[in-house]
Image: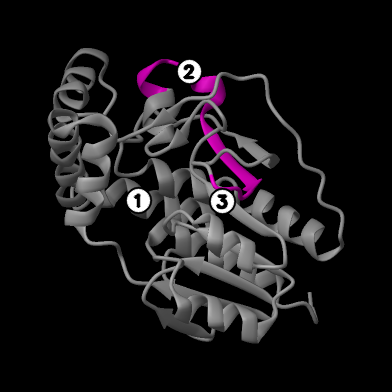
Amino acid sequence: MASQNKIIVVTAGGAYAWVIVNALANRFDTLEVVVEQPESKALFLKRRARKIGWLQTAGQFGTMLISRFGKRFAQSRSNEIITTSGAQPELAPEIPVTRVSSANASDCLDLIAAKKPDVVFLAGCRMLSKSTLAAISCPVINYHSGINPKYRGLAGGWWARATGDHENYGTTVHLVDAGVDTGETLYQAFLTPDPRETLMTDSLAMAAGSRDIALRAVEDALNGNLQPSSSDLPSVQRFHPPIWTYLMTGLVKRVW
């Protein structure tokens, strides 16, 4: 489908983000990607520790390490997801890319101001500050790997599986406000988790199964037909499980 509307996707990259970006690019031919530099782990951990304390932060960092280095052991499942879904986990080379220091930095805002997009779509980037949001005049939409508001934040798929809440395993596309995934919902995809999923494969599996809601949300934004809604689910911000919780859940419930 040809389109004269301008779409900018802001992301830090990664397989699940590229699945969503490629799906959008296959539909909208004037899409451009802005890739921000990853936030340093030191800054990330300091901010997390101020929120929840150093003990919990250290435990979560242990799980993050397992997730990072365990991806090689989950590669077979990841390959199966890619093969069966037709998802594209590498950014297509023809998509225009600009690299910036941060989604909240002046180089990113200057680029958005110059491009004058009709919609800004976020997929796996850091939270936008209030001042950044105020400087963007078009709708800002986010793809989130979890069902909002019950699984805001991180590892939404794992938490749904770990608590046996399989009916709320899925993803959300929502308007962006200054909170952590607190903006009003545009679309949600409720998926059935494969028993073989792990913390290392949830986001890829969910992205492969919910590309359509990203397309529908952007289409609505371009047509001026956004219809946000709220939910009566409890609102909970999730973090990576601390390593002791992750290991115990795996050993007892076989949920990894």
Q: Nearer the viewer, mark 2 or mark 3?
A: 3
Q: Residue 14, image x and y in percent?
A: 37, 62
Disc 1 residue type (three-letter): Ser
> Of callouts 1 and 2, which one flags the residue occurring earlier in the amino acid sequence?
1
- Mark 1 and mark 3 lie on one chain; the one further toward the N terminus is 1
Q: Is residue 80 visible?
A: yes
Position of 1 relative to 87 (above/below)? below
- Residue 127 to residue 32: above or below: above
In this view, the residue in front, 184 or 91, is 184
Q: Check disc 3 and report the residue beneath it.
A: 143
Residue corresponding to mark 1: 78
Residue drawn at (57%, 33%), measured in percent from left and top?
148
Q: Position of residue 123 (x, y in %)?
A: 51, 58
Q: Residues within 10 Å of mark 2 (few under 14, many from 20)?
A: few
Instruction: Give the residue type that dot 2 points to.
Output: Asp
**Quadrant containing the C terminus in the rendered view:** top left
Q: Residue 66's image quarter? A: top left
Marks 1 and 3: which is nearer the front? Answer: 3
The residue stretch that appears in magenta: 161-178
Distance of mark 1 from mark 2, alpha carbons?
A: 23 Å
Check disc 3 and give the amino acid type: Tyr
Left or right relative to 155: residue 56: left
Q: Nearer the viewer, residue 215 or 129?
A: 129
In-front residue for pair 151/132:
132
Q: Is residue 20 visible?
A: no
- Check the picture and name the quadrant holding the N terminus: bottom right
Kindly identify which residue carries mark 2.
165
Between circles 1 and 2, the one closer to the viewer is: 2
Residue 170 colored in magenta in the image: yes
At mark 2, the secondary structure is loop
Seen at 52% across and 45% down, the residue is 144
Q: CA distance from mark 1 to mark 3?
A: 20 Å
